[in-house]
Image: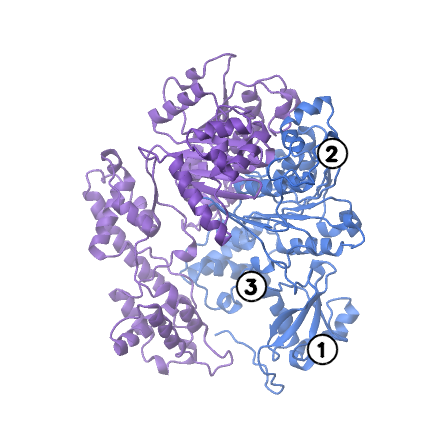
Chain colours: A purple, B blue
């Protein structure tokens, strides 16, 4: 998460608050809106087994200030816990592991509330899930008892909340996210270099006029003026000339490189610098900016998706529908309206920014009109429509679970087929064997490698023939259900990151399983 | 900013109490796995005799200390010259509000020692550069969680210089983690080093002074103007302290006035602070991932329980913005690496540059990044930053053209005090013809 937010809120003349100071480094990533979402969340960890990976995850959520967390764990602290879990010490021996971890985690951040279960010995897990909805998201660590698993699954299903399973053993781990339905994201934080959208092939009247003005009598302009025409206006000027001689705008790669040479030839070189910076910028921008806008596959997925009746009434789908209509009408998405920095006089650059902003506002108001006409669009805030329009090219849909998920056998076939190619091209091999072996110990932590293979064979009949599955089973068996702190800390980092993405609805979460191999130091994302 | 944590580690003989405590670690230390090398010793003796020293580092320091302690390392040294700031508390979990202002190394060391019984952590509240070769010689391996490329290059060249072919103990594996999302393992002189990989850290492009002075367009330009130009003019305080809110507020207000003058929007206190301090956003989860990856490699190197990164793949890149993606690959060692290679690296230079211009350009070039270079050619000294007498003697050379001082294809040696005692070797390749007569035109703002 390195994308930096520059917020445009009006400046305040007093310094930052204590909270802004404490959270400064993360507010630069997910802004006040993301922080608020975190502070409104209540997360449950259903802990079992060696019990470290979930606690490490919570550490990374308590520090940035999650509202509340609860640990449900019926274990008492033993010696083995102290060798792997940092949030326990000698004084905790013999006490409730849930309570002990909650207390030491809470020390990290006084703003966070922590709770544990069971409060009384022998209290059934069922009582935790009674009454009204409490949790925003549930994580459980594997291995887990079958009846407890059923309880959390039911609860997550009933309240339609995300459920994350985490399994760390020896040098391996995986975690899997079960989202309650399709999960749309507006604020995906695309790379800033990807977001430039200047519409140079389809300039609107104000832009064309402005550029024409700047390039009037271009050849006779003074050295200073000539060297300060922003590259955006240069490109529009040369595109106009190109169209006159070629009859059309450059569209193929060959035409674009020829156009680039054409622009470069306009540079004045009889000066001490031997060139002009604005022309250098124009030449560098040709291939990136001279192209007709096309919809990314993820935006097309949003447009093609048929939301259910309840989904269709949500803010996301009301605005998405309005944007789709906008696109159908204009064959373009609303203009994001930002202009990258470029060599120019300050006043000229600011005017250029205003031209893009004005067009962008015009597009927003058109979308807003469609939104307001929608039966569920009356109360949607303008700011939400603005944000959506700005990010329209990068919206993304993470699908929920399929109603009939593919069998492990069919996933395995695909992965091992890829591996045959990968061996030839020196690409890394699939980490599916790790998932399969860990998954086979979901309820049996101390299974031997032959137990694992036997269990696996129910779904993958030829598992015992596959050397990589056999090796993964041996490596899992070697750990005897024990966690290695490093592997759990690393996995806890990744899980916390994904939890933050889901809660803040910012950045793009995994779909849906992440496997980590601590031997080769690789991850792989699989949809299972 | 954060400095390395030196970590020295020993994994102790199991006694009755700690036997069950290290059950999970011993599962993988007593039993070989399918990928474990043949050198792996699983005997009781080998497990208890693991007694090696390590050394590790700082911005990721809290995580690294915790992870090493729970990997069974017993003797850890940590170096960090920083004191605790309130903005550290969102991720540096060994620190509390009441610790603000105290030494990071000391607070972190005491905390982990108290939490994990039997581990000894020695804090060093100083710079990594304050320690000499003898100090680094005592460790088994070094883990760096540094936030500056200069410090990384310094420790890298120091560990390369430490190598004594007669003494196998002089080889200290270097594990480097960065919150930008990388962890890498270096066997000095054997595998690609930090200097070989320098082009992975392109220096931040500076905004031309002309833009700041005459044609600002971005809020950042106004802030840089306040920072570089207005501050020097007005000198509101004797020296600029980036951590003093009063100083930042002064810059912020100056930048704001300038932005209004040019009708530029977007100057905020937070942005001012970000630009002036070059703040890189940081969160607990990324730190956890990178630090744990480094410590996992340290554990594998120390125990041989599984193959470690190093001789083949030696670099893992992690990215978590859009789903999760890792790329683990082999960065090749460079024969012309100025630190660990044997050949001089080719460096293109315009012979019509003055020596001064050439020296300044060395700071900006991705493959050099030398800020205070002293330079010698074969047989004579071109420019020395110190001592004062030598500086004075060689200063006139700064105005001479490169082409007057050296020939095309000549080898030069460059040293930079911030990077230790390494002599960077370059072979000069002239990019243009040398025109001895042309007056160098001074660039003007325009």
Mark 2 touches mark 1? (CB < 8 Å): no
Mark pair 2, 3: CA separation: 63 Å
Work out whether residue B285 or residue A272 is closer to the camera in this orientation and state it: B285
Q: Position of residue B14 (x, y in %)?
A: 73, 27
Going from N to C along the chain, the mark reached first, 2 or 3, is 2
In the rendered image, the vertical position of residue A338 relative to residue B399, given as above or below: above
Where residue B68 is drawn, which disc sits there? none
Do discs 3 and 1 belong to a common subunit? yes
Q: Is residue A63 visible?
A: no
Where residue B229 is drawn, which disc sits there? 3
Label 3 secondary element: helix
Do discs 2 and 3 belong to a common subunit? yes
Where residue B46 is drawn, which disc sits there? 2
In the rendered image, the vertical position of residue A227 relative to residue B80, given as above or below: below
Tell me the subunit letter for badge 2. Answer: B
Task: Name the residue rendered at 31%, 72% in the picture.
Answer: A239
For label 1, the residue is B396
Mark pair 3, 1: CA separation: 28 Å
Going from N to C along the chain, the mark reached first, 3 or 1, is 3
Going from N to C along the chain, the mark reached first, 2 or 1, is 2
Task: Name the residue rendered at 22%, 34% in the picture.
Answer: A309
Q: Position of residue A66 (x, y in %)?
A: 47, 33
Query: How packed is label 2: few (under 14 Cα within 10 Å), some, or many (20 or more)?
Result: some
Of badges 3 and 1, nearer the viewer stands 1
């Amino acid at each position: 998460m390195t994308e930096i937010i520059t917020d445009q809120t009006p400046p305040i003349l007093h310094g930052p608050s204590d909270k802004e100071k404490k959270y400064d480094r993360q507010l630069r990533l997910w802004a006040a809106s993301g922080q608020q979402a975190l502070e409104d969340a209540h997360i449950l960890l259903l802990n079992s087994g060696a019990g470290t990976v979930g606690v490490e995850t919570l550490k990374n959520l308590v520090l940035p200030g999650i509202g509340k967390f609860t640990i449900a764990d019926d274990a008492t602290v033993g010696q083995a816990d102290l060798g792997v879990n940092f949030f326990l010490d000698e004084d905790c021996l013999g006490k409730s592991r849930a309570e002990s971890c909650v207390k030491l985690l809470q020390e990290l951040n006084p703003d966070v509330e922590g709770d544990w279960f069971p409060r009384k010995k022998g209290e059934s897990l069922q009582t935790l899930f009674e009454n009204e909805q409490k949790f925003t998201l549930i994580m459980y660590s594997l291995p887990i008892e079958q009846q407890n698993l059923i309880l959390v699954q039911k609860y997550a299903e009933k309240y339609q909340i995300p459920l994350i399973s985490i399994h760390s053993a020896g040098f391996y781990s995986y975690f899997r996210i079960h989202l309650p339905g399709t999960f749309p994201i507006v604020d995906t934080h695309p790379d800033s270099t990807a977001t430039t959208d200047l519409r140079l092939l389809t300039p609107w009247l104000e832009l064309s006029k402005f550029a024409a003005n700047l390039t009037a009598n271009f050849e006779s302009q003074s050295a200073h003026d000539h060297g300060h025409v922003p590259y955006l206006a240069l490109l529009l000027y040369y595109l106009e000339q190109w169209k006159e001689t070629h009859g059309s705008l450059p569209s193929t790669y060959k035409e674009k490189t020829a156009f680039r040479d054409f622009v470069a030839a306009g540079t004045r070189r009889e000066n001490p610098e031997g060139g002009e910076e604005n022309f250098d910028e124009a030449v560098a921008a040709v291939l990136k900016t001279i192209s007709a806008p096309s919809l990314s596959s993820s935006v097309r997925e949003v447009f093609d998706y048929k939301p259910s009746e309840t989904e269709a009434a949500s803010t996301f789908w009301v605005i998405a529908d309005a944007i789709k209509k906008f696109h159908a009408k204009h064959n373009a998405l609303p203009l994001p309206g930002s202009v990258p920095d470029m060599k120019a006089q300050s006043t000229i650059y600011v005017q250029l920014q205003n031209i893009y902003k004005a067009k962008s506002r015009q597009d927003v108001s058109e979308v807003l009109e469609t939104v307001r006409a929608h039966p569920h669009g009356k109360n949607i805030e303008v700011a939400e429509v603005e944000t959506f329009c700005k990010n329209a090219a990068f919206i993304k849909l993470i699908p929920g679970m399929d109603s009939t998920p593919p069998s492990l056998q069919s996933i395995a076939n695909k992965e091992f087929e890829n591996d045959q190619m990968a061996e030839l091209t020196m690409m890394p091999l699939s980490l599916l064997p790790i998932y399969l072996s860990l998954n086979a110990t979901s309820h049996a932590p101390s299974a031997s490698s032959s137990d694992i293979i036997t269990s696996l064979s129910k779904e993958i009949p030829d598992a015992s023939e596959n050397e990589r599955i056999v090796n993964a089973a041996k490596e899992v068996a070697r750990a005897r259900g024990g966690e290695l702190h490093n592997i759990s800390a690393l996995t806890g980092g990744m899980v916390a990151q994904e939890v933050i993405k889901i809660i803040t609805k910012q950045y793009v979460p995994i779909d849906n399983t992440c496997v980590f191999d601590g031997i080769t130091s690789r991850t792989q994302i699989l949809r299972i | 900013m954060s400095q390395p944590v030196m970590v020295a580690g020993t994994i102790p003989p199991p006694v009755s109490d700690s036997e069950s405590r290290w059950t999970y670690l011993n599962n993988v230390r007593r039993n070989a796995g399918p990928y474990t090398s043949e050198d792996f010793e699983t005997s009781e003796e080998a497990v208890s005799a693991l007694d090696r020293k390590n050394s590790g580092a700082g911005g990721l320091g809290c995580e690294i200390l915790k992870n090493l302690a729970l990997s069974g390392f017993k003797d850890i040294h940590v170096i960090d010259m920083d004191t605790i700031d309130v903005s550290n508390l969102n991720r540096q979990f060994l620190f509390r509000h009441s610790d603000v202002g105290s030494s990071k190394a000391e607070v972190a060391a005491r905390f982990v020692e108290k939490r994990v019984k039997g581990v000894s952590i020695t804090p060093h509240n100083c710079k990594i550069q304050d320690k000499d070769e003898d100090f680094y010689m005592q460790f088994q391996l070094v883990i760096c969680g540094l936030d500056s490329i200069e410090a990384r290059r310094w420790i890298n060249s120091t560990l390369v210089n430490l190598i004594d072919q007669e003494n196998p103990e002089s080889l200290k594996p270097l594990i480097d983690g960065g919150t930008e999302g990388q962890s890498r393992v270096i066997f000095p002189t054997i595998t690609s080093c930090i200097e070989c990989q320098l082009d992975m850290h392109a220096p931040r492009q500076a905004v031309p002074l002309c833009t700041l002075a005459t044609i600002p367009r971005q809020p950042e330009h106004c802030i840089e103007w306040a920072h570089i130009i207005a501050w020097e003019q007005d000198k509101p305080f004797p020296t600029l302290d980036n951590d003093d809110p009063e100083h930042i507020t002064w810059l912020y207000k100056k930048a704001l006035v300038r932005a209004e003058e040019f009708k530029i929007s977007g100057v905020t206190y937070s942005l001012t602070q970000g630009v002036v301090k070059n703040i890189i956003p940081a969160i607990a989860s990324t730190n956890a991932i990178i630090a744990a990856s480094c410590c996992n490699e340290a554990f594998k190197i120390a125990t041989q329980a599984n193959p470690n990164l190093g001789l083949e793949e030696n670099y893992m890149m992690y990215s978590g913005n859009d789903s999760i993606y890792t790329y683990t690959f082999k960065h090749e060692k460079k024969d012309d690496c100025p630190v660990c290679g044997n050949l001089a690296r080719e460096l293109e230079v315009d012979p019509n540059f003055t020596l001064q211009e050439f020296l300044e350009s060395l700071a900006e070039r991705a493959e050099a990044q030398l800020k205070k270079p002293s330079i010698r050619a074969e047989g004579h000294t071109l420019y020395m930053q110190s001592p004062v007498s030598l500086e004075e003697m060689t200063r006139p050379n700064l105005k001479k053209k490169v082409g007057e001082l050296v020939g095309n294809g000549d080898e030069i040696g460059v040293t930079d005090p911030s990077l230790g005692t390494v002599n960077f070797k370059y072979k000069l390749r002239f990019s243009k013809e040398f025109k001895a007569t042309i007056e160098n035109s001074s660039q003007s703002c325009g």
